[in-house]
């Protein structure tokens, strides 16, 4: 049996990926994570008809999405996720370094479930990830 | 000048009309009351009359009844007659005796024209009758006869109809009593049949006064009906002994049987409204009603009504005429008075016009003597009014002969215009004038004199000369000016050309600037992203090492890694400040009127929250309203006040003061504190980016605050400066332009 990811992470910065993974470890829970380093890869996973996601039909509990990613940017991907019947219900948390007001507004209007700015302080960074997991992944478990 | 209007006392047509209506109404009311009282008089006269007639009729009926009873009593009390009748009934009376009895009865019948006299025995059988007795006799008479026998008294019956002849009769039943040895026995009854037509009806019917509707009635009650016992004057086709129900309450007959007496109103059996007088007839159940139609009573009123109406109309017309006359008279009086007042004021008006004239005005009579002058004439001649009047007109001029000719010309032609003369005043001063004059005439058209007005033309002459000179000057100047304008025009054309080129340049620059702005935006974006990402990584890895591999580091190594982390945070803040500083360059200013006191209070409130436990006070002095971008000016106060709070930290009590004043076309604002201050030697570094005058160990911050203040104020076109001494606090000043006028 293949394990299905609890978390899909779309992030191009390898340092950030490592920090996020480190923070996930800090939560003390085993969270299976699937990482895409560009928008196109993620899009293939979610939308290609014969993809693992499409055939198995077991959705991840959360998508953690950066905005500034190559090929298909985060906002574009968000819009596609929120307009497809199979992916619409998956929570999407935007995790980005952009603190532009316009970005925040557009993301919420496009259906983002949360919008967080990556903090510079590593302690805070780890704390944020912990909160996200506790809230989104934990909650989903309770529901199912 | 306004002619005064005399609105007061004008007699109003309305008032006259109201008076007329009131008087008319009064007359109509009086006439109506008179009419009513006459009507009442007539009614009471009629009532007296029918009362009198009723009394008369009652007396007549009474006497008729009395006579009948008296007749009966003659038989009733006649014991000899009774004895004879007794013998007759017993069959033992002699023929002479019979003759005696029956001749008495016959004589009685004949003398009173009775219809019949009958003798009945005590078994009510007819034993004798003057006329052949009727077959139904005992049927009709039985009750009355029975009553007479039972009561042993004379009974007068009611009216009844003989059904065969249709005549109305009454009967008197007389019981025959015979007394012997104190014992009384009934022998029989004598019945007298009376024809009321003979005496009773005519007595009732006759009406003692002229009139068509007067009528007397005898009635009585039978059960629930009233019966009219006599012949009715106006009931030709009605049956004898007419009956009406007592439910017909309006009938006077019904009123009579219901107990009414004296005068009553009502509707009689014909349906006519009448006035009646009711009397009971003594010793009977009969009532007498004398009545007369209301129509007849009030007949004279119709005529009187027309007479009264005629007089009312006549009096109203006369009143109307009198009131109209008085009103016309008042009106004409008012207009006359008003005209007089208007005339007077017109005269005053005319006089004041004359006096108001700046031109000397005079009137001259046919002999050339002055009759009247205005005050301007006094002024120009230097003579008083009394000196002038009566003097010769021509002697006041330099050329008397020409003056004489002048006014004679007026008499010939009727008027002259602009006749040139020169006036000489008493002091010898000569005034050039133009004379305008016209003849004035009396009502018949005969010339009375000349009305003359002189116009001083000295000033006019001088003005004409000046005007000419000015005109010449003007021409010269126009020529010069034209030359100048031509030169200027050429210069202007050149300038316009230059300006157009400049505009093109400006457009180019704007394009460049826009491009730069865009670049700067993307520059900001990369700073925030690309500079932060590695910093985040440095901090992140440092943290991981410290956490995951603590055993491989000695204390010094750990401390240095912590320092790396601290420095990345400082770097992050520097980037933030740099970004916000660079954004200031591009931000569009949105200027508005600012209440500086409110801004300061807002900022101070935030500072109090951030700095709990600090013993700090602010006093806001008089401060003019500002003109600038609300957010940016608030930022200025935020930076200045947080500096003030920061650098007073060492003091036991932070005393901060803010205020401002107007100086020329700018407002100067200041923020003063009692903090550590700074050394004026380093003043030139005060507003530089990332410049600090105090060590960052003592006072946190990146050194951008004052640079931002300076940038914001410069963008508003103002100035910033500061004054301080070490440990004696600092004052920061900035200026803003006064409110711009929005066109």
Image: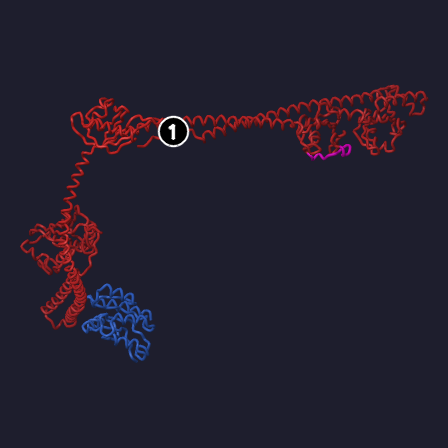
Chain colours: A blue, B red
Residue B358 visible in the snapshot? no
What residue is at 29 percent from the left and 26 percent from the top? Answer: B449
User: In the image, is B355 to the left or to the right of B666?
Assistant: right
Res. B456 image quadrant: top left
Given residues B273 and B626, the one toward you in this image is B273
Is there any visible trace of residue A91 in the rendered image?
yes
Residue B461 lies in magenta, yes or no?
no
- At x 63% / y 28%, what residue is drawn? B302
**How many marks overall?**
1
Q: Main secondary structure of the magenta part?
A: loop
- Whether B247 is among the magenta residues is yes
- Residue located farthest toward the left when viewing the structure as drawn: B681
Q: Mark 1 points at which residue?
A: B8
The boundaries of the magenta stretch are B236-248
Q: In which quarter of the image is residue A39?
A: bottom left
- Image side of residue B77 versus residue A127, left or right: right
The x and y percentages for residue B327 are 45, 27
Of residues A101 and B517, the one nearer the viewer is B517
Q: Where is residue B574 in the image (x, y as percent from the top left)?
A: 14, 63
B113 lies above or below B607:
above
Q: In which quarter of the image is the N terminus of chain B?
A: top left
Image position, residue B144 (x, y; %): 82, 29
Left/right of residue B230 with respect to residue B424 in the rendered view: right
Q: Which is more toward the observer, B700 or B244?
A: B244
């Amino acid at each position: 049996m293949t394990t299905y990811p609890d978390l899909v992470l779309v992030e191009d910065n390898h340092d950030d990926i490592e920090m996020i993974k480190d923070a996930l470890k800090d939560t003390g829970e085993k969270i299976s994570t699937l990482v895409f380093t560009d928008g196109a890869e993620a899009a293939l996973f979610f939308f290609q008809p014969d993809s693992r996601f499409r055939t198995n039909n077991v959705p991840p509990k959360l998508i953690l999405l950066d905005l500034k990613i190559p090929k298909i940017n985060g906002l574009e991907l968000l819009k596609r996720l929120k307009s497809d019947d199979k992916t619409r219900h998956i929570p999407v948390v935007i995790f980005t370094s952009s603190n532009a007001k316009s970005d925040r507004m557009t993301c919420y209007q496009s259906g983002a479930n949360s919008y967080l700015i990556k903090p510079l302080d590593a302690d805070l960074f780890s704390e944020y990830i912990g909160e996200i997991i506790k809230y989104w992944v934990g909650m989903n478990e309770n529901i199912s | 000048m306004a002619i005064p209007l005399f609105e007061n006392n004008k007699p109003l047509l309305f008032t006259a009309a109201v008076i007329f209506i009131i008087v008319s109404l009064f007359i109509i009311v009086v006439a109506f009351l008179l009419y009513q009282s006459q009507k009442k008089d007539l009614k009471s006269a009629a009532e007296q009359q029918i009362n009198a007639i009723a009394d008369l009729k009652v007396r007549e009926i009474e006497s008729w009844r009395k006579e009948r009873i008296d007749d009966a009593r003659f038989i009733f009390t006649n014991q000899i007659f009774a004895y004879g009748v007794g013998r007759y009934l017993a069959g033992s009376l002699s023929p002479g005796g019979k003759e005696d009895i029956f001749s008495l009865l016959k004589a009685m019948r004949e003398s009173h024209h009775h219809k019949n006299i009958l003798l009945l025995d005590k078994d009510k059988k007819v034993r004798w009758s003057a006329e052949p007795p009727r077959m139904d006799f005992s049927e009709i008479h039985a009750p009355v006869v029975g009553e007479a026998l039972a009561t042993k008294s004379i009974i007068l019956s009611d009216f009844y109809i003989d059904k065969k002849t249709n005549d109305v009769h009454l009967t008197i039943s007389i019981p025959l009593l015979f007394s012997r040895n104190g014992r009384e026995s009934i022998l029989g009854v004598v019945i007298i049949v009376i024809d009321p037509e003979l005496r009773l009806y005519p007595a009732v019917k006759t009406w003692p006064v002229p009139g068509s509707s007067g009528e007397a009635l005898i009635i009585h009650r039978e059960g629930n009906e009233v019966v009219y016992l006599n012949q009715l004057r106006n009931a030709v086709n009605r049956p004898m002994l007419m009956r009406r129900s007592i439910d017909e309450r309006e009938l006077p007959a019904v009123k009579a049987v219901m107990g009414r007496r004296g005068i009553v109103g009502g509707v009689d059996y014909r349906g006519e409204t009448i006035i009646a007088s009711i009397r009971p007839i003594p010793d009977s159940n009969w009532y007498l009603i004398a009545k007369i139609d209301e129509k007849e009573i009030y007949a004279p009123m119709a005529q009187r009504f027309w007479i009264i109406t005629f007089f009312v109309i006549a009096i109203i017309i006369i009143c109307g005429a009198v009131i109209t006359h008085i009103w016309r008279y008042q009106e004409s009086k008012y207009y006359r008075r008003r005209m007089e007042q208007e005339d007077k004021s017109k005269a005053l008006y005319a006089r004041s016009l004359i006096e108001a004239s700046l031109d000397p005005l005079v009137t001259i009579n046919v002999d050339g003597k002055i009759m009247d002058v205005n005050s301007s004439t006094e002024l120009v001649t230097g003579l008083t009014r009394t000196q002038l009047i009566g003097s010769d007109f021509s002697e006041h001029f330099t050329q008397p002969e020409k003056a004489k000719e002048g006014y004679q010309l007026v008499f010939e032609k009727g008027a002259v215009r602009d006749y040139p003369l020169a006036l000489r005043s008493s002091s010898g001063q000569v005034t050039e004038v133009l004379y305008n004059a016209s003849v004035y005439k009396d009502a018949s058209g005969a010339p009375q004199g000349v009305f003359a007005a002189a116009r001083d033309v000295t000033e006019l002459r001088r003005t004409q000369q000046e005007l000419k000179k000015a005109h010449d000057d003007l021409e010269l100047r126009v020529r010069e000016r034209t030359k100048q304008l031509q030169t200027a025009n050429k210069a202007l054309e050149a300038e316009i050309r230059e300006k157009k080129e400049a505009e093109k340049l400006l457009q180019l620059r704007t394009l460049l600037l826009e491009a730069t702005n865009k670049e700067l935006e993307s520059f900001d974006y990369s700073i925030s992203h690309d500079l932060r990402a590695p910093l985040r990584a440095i901090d992140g890895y440092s943290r991981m090492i410290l956490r995951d591999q603590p055993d491989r580091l000695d204390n010094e190594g750990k401390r240095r890694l912590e320092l790396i982390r601290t420095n990345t945070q400082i770097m992050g803040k520097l980037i933030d400040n740099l970004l916000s500083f660079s954004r200031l360059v591009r931000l569009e200013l949105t200027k508005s009127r600012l209440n500086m006191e409110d801004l300061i209070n807002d900022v101070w409130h935030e500072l109090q929250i951030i700095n709990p436990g600090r013993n700090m006070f602010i006093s806001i002095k008089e401060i003019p309203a500002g003109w600038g971008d609300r957010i940016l000016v608030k930022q200025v106060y935020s930076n200045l006040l947080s500096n003030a709070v920061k650098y007073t930290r060492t003091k036991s009590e932070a005393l901060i003061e803010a205020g401002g004043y107007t100086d020329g076309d700018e407002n100067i604002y200041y923020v003063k504190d009692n903090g550590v201050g700074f050394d004026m030697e380093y003043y030139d570094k005060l507003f530089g980016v990332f410049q600090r005058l105090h060590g960052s160990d003592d006072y946190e911050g990146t050194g951008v605050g004052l640079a931002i203040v300076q940038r914001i104020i410069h963008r508003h076109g103002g100035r910033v400066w500061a004054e301080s001494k070490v440990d004696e606090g600092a004052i920061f000043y900035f200026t803003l332009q006064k409110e711009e006028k929005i066109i």
